[in-house]
Image (cartoon, rainbow, N blue to C red):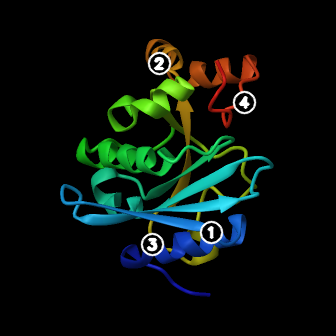
C-alpha cells in the first residue's frame, strides 16, 4: 500500500478516482496567481448513465486554510463547456474567502463566470454536500490509502437555481436537502426548473 501525505494528496485522489470512476477521458488545468496552485478538473464518462462526472485535484492542497482536506465532484446530464471553469471558480471562491470546506455550503455567482451557462440552465448557484449517489467508501480516503491525516473527503457540488439557493439561505442545509428529496429533484439535471 502506498502511503500519501499532504504533499501528494493529489496522487491519492487520482488513485481514488480511478478506483471508483475509472480512467479520465479529459483533463482541464486551471492556474490563477491569487491561488498560487494549479487545480485540475478531470472528466469521466459513464459513471452515471447519461451523465458526465467532473472531479477536482488540487483543492486538498488548501486543507489547512479550509480546516478540511477535500476535493469536489460534480455530475451533470448535459455537458456545457463552462462547467470545468465554474467548478474552478467555486474552488477559487472557497479558498480566497477561507470558507470551511464541508457539507452544506451554498455559493452564488455562476453568472460572473458564464452568463451563457446561467441563461441556458437557470443555475446561478452551486451547493456542496455529501456524495450520496456514489458507492460506499467513495466519500473518505483515509483507510485505504494509509493517510495519517484526518479523513480526506470528497464532496458533491450541485448546480442550483437562485430560488433554490434562496431556499437554502432561508431554511438551512438540512431543510434544503429534505426539500430536494421531498420534491424528487434530480440534482444532476441542469435543465430542471
Q: Is residue 44 above or below residue 4?
A: above
Marks 4 and 2: in contact by CB < 8 Å?
A: no
Which residue is tagged 2? 162
Which residue is tagged 3? 9
Helix, strand, or loop for circle 2?
helix
State the count of labels. 4
Real-space CA distance between mark 1 and mark 2, rounded to the nearest whole angstrom = 31 Å
Marks 1 and 4: in contact by CB < 8 Å?
A: no
Q: Earlier in the sequence, mark 1 or mark 3?
A: 3
Q: What x and y, as percent, mark residue 120?
A: 54, 28
Which residue is tagged 1? 24
Could you tell me which residue is drawn at 33 percent across and 50 percent down?
Answer: 66
Helix, strand, or loop for circle 4?
loop
Dot 3 alpha-carbon crowd within 10 angstroms: few under 14, some 14 to 19, many 20 or more: many
Marks 2 and 3: in contact by CB < 8 Å?
A: no
Q: Earlier in the sequence, mark 2 or mark 4?
A: 2
Real-space CA distance between mark 1 and mark 3, rounded to the nearest whole angstrom = 18 Å
Marks 2 and 1: in contact by CB < 8 Å?
A: no
Q: Earlier in the sequence, mark 3 or mark 2?
A: 3
Amino acid at each position: 500500500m502506498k502511503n500519501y501525505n499532504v504533499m501528494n494528496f493529489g496522487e491519492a485522489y487520482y488513485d481514488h478516482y480511478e478506483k471508483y470512476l475509472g480512467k479520465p477521458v479529459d483533463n482541464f488545468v486551471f492556474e490563477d496567481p491569487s491561488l498560487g496552485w494549479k487545480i485540475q478538473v478531470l472528466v469521466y464518462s459513464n459513471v452515471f448513465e447519461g451523465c458526465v462526472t467532473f472531479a477536482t485535484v488540487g483543492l486538498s492542497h488548501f486543507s489547512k486554510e479550509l480546516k478540511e482536506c477535500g476535493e469536489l465532484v460534480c455530475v451533470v446530464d448535459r455537458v456545457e463547456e463552462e462547467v470545468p471553469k465554474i467548478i474552478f471558480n467555486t474552488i477559487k471562491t472557497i479558498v480566497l474567502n477561507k470558507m470551511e470546506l464541508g457539507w452544506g455550503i451554498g455559493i452564488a455567482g455562476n453568472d460572473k463566470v458564464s452568463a451563457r451557462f446561467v441563461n441556458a440552465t437557470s443555475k446561478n448557484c452551486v451547493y456542496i454536500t455529501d456524495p450520496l449517489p456514489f458507492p460506499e467508501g467513495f466519500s473518505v480516503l483515509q483507510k485505504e490509502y494509509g493517510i495519517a491525516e484526518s479523513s480526506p473527503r470528497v464532496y458533491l457540488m450541485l448546480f442550483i437555481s437562485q430560488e433554490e439557493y434562496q431556499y437554502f439561505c432561508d431554511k438551512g442545509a438540512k431543510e434544503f436537502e429534505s426539500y430536494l428529496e421531498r420534491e424528487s429533484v434530480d440534482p444532476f439535471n441542469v435543465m430542471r426548473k
